[in-house]
Structure formats: structure tokens, C-alpha cells
Amino acid sequence: MKGIKEIADFQDLFFKMAKEKSEELLKGDIQKEIESEKDFPVSIKADFNLLINEISALATTRSFLEDIIEELKSDLNDLLKSKDYDEFINNFKDLVEIEQLKNLPDVLRGIIHMEIGLALSFITVINNLKDIRIEDYEDSFNQYFFSDGYKTVSEDLIVRPKLPHISSFADIKTLGNQIKAERYIRDIIRIIVETTGDRLYKLRERYPKFIQEYQDNSKKKLIDWFDSFGDMAEASLLPVVEGVINGAFSIKLNPLIAAAIGTFCSVTARKATEHSYLTLLGIKYG
């Protein structure tokens, strides 16, 4: 299973790099921003090259994908033949200690049984978050599947795709929320990384303090920028990751795997950026 292990190792390396560089991603003078009458930053600068360089390094080792693609296809075929979830995760025994994967919530077991990208995401989390609580993920996914959606730290909703109800012309708008495999993969990996990042950087505890401190009219724009810098991080990383993984080598790779790796890395960058932003504003970690 060399092919799968190579991808797992890459995600593991990127996760560690994002954590290591997280406090260096944003620099600037908050007082200048408060005094500025502009709705956009005048001094805060984002340096995502710190992370993009890790992705771009793949381009210097063309064999990363070229040497493993056939074996990866074979690995995937074997995995998809697994009779049940326990047999599926046992195929990862050479990658990580997988005992905690056996404790994943039932709502995920059937999905992960058929999708390598989700399993790799949990593997990375287990490798890098020693005090992981599976219950946190169970709650997150129950929100996604059984309520109005998973609520991020800034209270945006990640809403599952739904079957459209077409009874009038107005209902045609719901077609934009169609059920698609890639949409599910991206949403579920996003929730895995959001839940992990919130715990890793204690964002759920720090964000309310941030809101309380910057709720005055002169400072409110700084609250809006929390999501803006996160969006910028994703926009900077996602095309680079998916470009390298899915296009740089002219290789036909399962698009769901490319989507999984791209989403994992870009949302990991978002969470590191959220941590960096709160740190810049004096909302300390720990």
C-alpha cells in the first residue's frame, strides 16, 4: 500500500507544517487598522507562501505520483472489496495505530468504508492530535446530517446537499444544492478539519473573547475579517494543491482523491490562519 501511505505521509507533513507556521501567517499593526477608515486591511499582510512552498515542493519530485499511481489504483480496488468497515480500516494497519478508527460514530462508518480520502483525514488527525475525542466528531456529523447544518466557530453553516423539491419556478433554485459525491467528500473532510482545528487551537474558547473585545463600532470590521482571512487562505491553497495533485503530472487520478487532499490542505490552512489572526489581535492560545 505504498501509494496510499505516500499520500498519508504528505498530509501528515502538511498538517505539521501548518501548525508550526501558524503564528507566522499574518503580520500587521492592529492599531492602524482600528484607526483606518477603510473596510479592507491597510497593514495586515498574509504570507501563505510558507505553506504553498510545501505543496509546490511536490513538483520537484515528479515520481511522487508517477511511481505510485498504478499501485494506488490497485490499493483502491482492494479496499473497495472490503466486506465491512472493520476489514476496510484493517488495511491501514501499516500506516497508523488504528484502534481509534474503530470507535468512529456509526454515522460515518458506512461512508468511510467506501472513501479513502476520509480515512486518510482521520489518520492524519489521530497522528497529530493526541487528546482526540471521537465524541467531538460524532456531534459535528450529527449536526451536519440531522440538523440545520454544522455550525463553524464563526457560526457559518455547512449544510448537507438535499433532494430538490420542484413544485414551482422558485424551487428551481434548490438545484444548486444537489447531492453529489464530491460535495459530500468536501463537506465531510471540511468538518473533520474544522473540528480538529477548533480543538487544536482552542478556537471555540477564544472566539467569544474576540467578539467581546472587538464589538465596538470602530472595531467591528475586525470581526468580519476573521472569515475573510480564512477564505483567503483557502483560495490561496486549494488551486495549488489540486493543481499539483490532479494536473501537474498529466496523470488520471480519481477526482474524489484530489478533492479530498485539496480540501484537507486548504481547510487546514484556514484553521491555522484563524489561529494566527486571533493571536495577532491579542487573543492568546493557551
Image (tube, grey):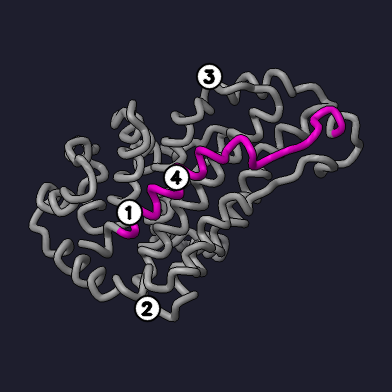
Q: Earlier in the sequence, mark 3 or mark 2?
A: 2
Q: Are marks 3 and 2 in contact (CB under 8 Å)?
A: no
Q: For the residue labelled by badge 4, is the local secondary structure a helix, a strand or a loop?
A: helix
Q: Position of residue 23 (x, y in %)?
A: 61, 35
Q: Nearer the viewer, residue 170 or 106?
A: 106
163 and 89: which is toward the camera: 89
Mark 1: give few (<14), some (14-19) or many (20+) Cα within 10 Å. many
Secondary structure of the residue carrying numbered label 2: loop
Q: Quadrant of residue 199?
A: top left
| Point 40% across, 62% down: residue | 182
**What is the CA distance from the residue labelled 1 to the residue labelled 2?**
19 Å
Q: Taking the image as drawn, is residue 80 in sight?
A: yes
What is the crowding at mark 3: few (fewer than 14 residues within 10 Å), some, or many (at least 20)?
few
Residue type pointed to by label 4: Phe
Amino acid under label 2? Lys
Q: Is residue 9 left or right of residue 221?
A: left
Residue placed under numbered mark 3 in the picture: 286
Q: Identify the magenta region.
A: 6-32
Q: Amino acid at mark 3?
A: Gly
Measured in 3D between alpha carbons, the distance from the residue under mark 2 to the one under mark 4, in whole angstroms, is 25 Å
Q: Which mark is residue 15?
A: 4
